[in-house]
Image (cartoon, grey):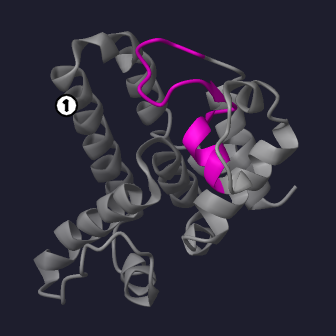
Amino acid sequence: MTINEKIVSNILQREGGFVAHPSDPGGPTNFGITQNTLGRFLGRFATVDDIRNLTEQMARAIYMKNYIVEPNLDEIDPVDLRDLVVDCAVNHGVTTAVKWLQTAINEQITKWGMTLLVVDGSLGPKTKKALSYVNKDRLFEQIIARRIEFYCQLVKDDLNKIVFLMGWIKRALSFLGRDREIWIL
């Protein structure tokens, strides 16, 4: 199993199977895949039955294509940071996840007077190069803090989402720890 396949396996484990929670604005999901995401992948409207009948193999293909390969997230090193950013992309969108990464990098490189990255949500060569200059453990903390702030704002905006808050925070915090790289490999 490749590193990217392991990242997808981690996501599938966290996401679980078919769910149709009334407070989830994404609607029914299976393996964490929404109707909209499946519809884009299929090139047509996806029904609830399409979601219910989604295979793990197809979910893996969607995650690999939409959240790792096409947005170039497979180029993030170290691997444990890639795992975190991909997980953020799955929950918050690729653009948001990369913007959080770029903002965290900028917060560190401003201390050295380096040129700031454009926070555009696109993982290009400048963002990848800037990764080599920053403290990766600090990046984890910064991205996880943003993620938790985001979750809290979602609940503040819609109290019906409070049922998800503890799970969201546990998921975010699961990326902290000294053995992150061992956990993913």
Q: Nearer the viewer, residue 114 or 159?
A: 159
Q: Circle 1 sits on which residue? A: 153
Which quadrant of the figure has residue 153? top left
Which quadrant of the figure has residue 53? top right
Residue 101 to residue 35: above or below: below
Q: How many marks?
A: 1
Query: Percent x, y for residue 59?
Result: 75, 43
Q: Nearer the viewer, residue 184 or 42?
A: 42
Measuring 31% from the left and 69% from the top, which residue is drawn there? 102
Using the rendered image of the protein, determine whether residue 185 is visible from the camera's viewpoint.
no
Residue 181 to residue 23: above or below: below
In which quadrant will I find the N terminus?
A: bottom right
In the image, residue 27 lies in the stretch drawn in magenta: yes
Query: Percent x, y for residue 13?
Result: 70, 30
Q: Amino acid at mark 1?
A: Gln
Measuring 71% from the left and 30% from the top, which residue is drawn there? 51
**Label 1: how many residues lie within 10 Å, few (<14), some (14-19) or many (20+)?**
few
Query: Percent x, y for residue 46?
Result: 67, 39
Which quadrant of the figure has residue 112? bottom left
Measuring 26% from the left and 63% from the top, which residue is drawn there? 104
Q: Secondary structure at mark 1?
A: helix
Bounds of the magenta span?
20-40
Measuring 30% from the left and 11% from the top, which residue is drawn there? 160
Q: Looking at this view, name the residue that lies furthest to the front.
A: 45
Query: Percent x, y for residue 178?
Result: 51, 43
Instruction: Decide if residue 121 is on the left or right side of residue 167.
Output: left
Q: Nearer the viewer, residue 146 or 51?
A: 51
Using the rendered image of the protein, determine whether residue 180 is visible from the camera's viewpoint.
yes
